[in-house]
Image (tube, rainbow, N blue to C red):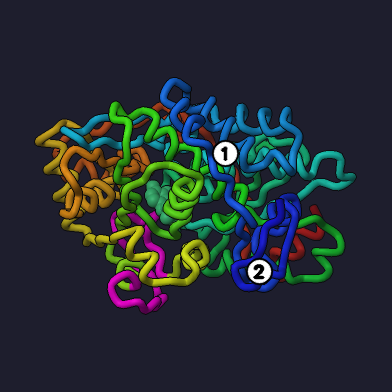
Amino acid sequence: MNYYSTEDRQLRRTLKEAVLEGLAPDGGLFMPESIPSLPKAQIQSFKSKTFLEIAREIALSLFHEDLPESEIMNITDSAINFDTPLVKVEEGIYTLELFHGPTLAFKDVGARFMARMMGHFTRGLAQEVNVLVATSGDTGSAVASGFWNVEGIQVYILYPSGGVSQLQEKQLTTLRGNITALEVSGTFDDCQRMVKSAFLDQDLTEKLILTSANSINLARLLPQSFYYFNAWARLPENHEFYVSVPSGNFGNLTAGLIAGKMGLPVKHYIVATNVNDVVPEYLETGKFRPRPSIPTIANAMDVGNPSNFARILDLYGHSHDAITAAMSAYSYNDDELRSTIGEVYLRTGYLLDPHGAAGYRALMAHTPREKGIPGVFLETAHPGKFSLTVEEVIQSTVEIPEQLQEASSKKKSSIGLTADFPDFKEYLLHL
Ligand SMILES: *Cc1c(COP(=O)(O)O)cnc(C)c1O
């Protein structure tokens, strides 16, 4: 199957090209030329299958034209090494816990899958492939962990010195092996600029194979559709459901929309954001006004120019009417997110993280919601990752999962760089 650019449908790439290029050369995002439609009986059969079994079947539908079946199974089995359980929070309301992977956030699913697919596509090359990533925190740790020990690939993570949490820094800097942490005396924007300059620098691109691993990569996006099917499969009910998605760059929501196009019976999508409400505003006014992001306690959703919006427009033929028919959006400030965490914990005993809190609250706020039709919100991170915020709200301590404790006890290893591109270039040329 070919993949086209959202900027120009005539610009087509194979799966391999699209995955290695990441972003289309015209600045567009790649989309599949056709989204496979799963037979009803197959979707029904998911009710008696595990998450991994479901993931394998969907991976096969998506990639069977481009990869041998045995390789699709290898990639999927190795990437999906944790569950995404559905947990009942109250009557008719469930959460899909996406935080049981190595870095305790949903990004593990896509990052692990992408790493293995890139590993497949670059196998047998004479040279190693160098993945360059700039991170302000969570993406970097999922990518680092996802690529760790994948053969033939070296990963360079640029992060702003003092600009990520202590725990995030540990997750980036303690893996070693094929993961190198570059600590930049500058901001996240500096890191991003340095990575962009590297891709455009002829000396570097002639000498090294460089690629990116950011969230717009298809190999990260498409596997995120797997767990939407798992959500439905684990519901006791056997009909449509509502799904609420805490959103920042809108990759997670886009994967859910793709699952719907594949046949998943989603009644309506509910979009939850923090005060970075560019997409809720678009739904209300039809105008898309990207702007600088505002810091919040749900910081993985602090996005002022959501990159996957281009894919959403594309999926609905740029029709505002079609988009508002499929989804509704709600946005919340930090006080509202905090009070939701406290209220739900007191009443049900379920502990939300700040992102999941937005998802829960938006689901409850969607009053056209029909009784008898279940609602699922995605829990995108473990509350222990945001222990400072959460503990302050519930006035007691939060259990920190083993994965986090392990990283925090290891010794940091990073290489310091200035925020000047020539410094970074020199480093890369002398690898
Ligand atoms: C990245 C992230 C989000 C936002 O996901 P998008 O796909 O960018 O919309 C939400 N919650 C957490 C915890 C995240 O890490």
Query: Who's the residue at 67% across and 41% down the image?
Result: 63
Q: Pointer 1: residues within 10 angstroms few (<14), some, or many (20+)? A: many
Can you give x and y, in whole percent of width and height, for residue 108 in the image? 51, 40
List the residue tagged with mark 2.
9
Magenta span: 282-304
Can you give x and y, in whole percent of width and height, for residue 91 in the image? 16, 33
Mark 1 or 2, nearer chain start: 2
Q: Nearer the viewer, residue 135 or 218?
A: 218
- Residue 145, numbered circle: 1
The stretch drawn in magenta includes residue 289: yes
Does the image show residue 13? Answer: yes
Q: Is residue 425 left or right of residue 253?
A: right
Query: Who's the residue at 71% across and 50% down the image?
Result: 1
The amino acid beneath tag 2 is Arg
How many discs mark residues in the rendered view?
2
The amino acid beneath tag 1 is Ser
Q: Is residue 391 left or right of residue 11?
A: left
Locate residue 275: give its quadrant: bottom left
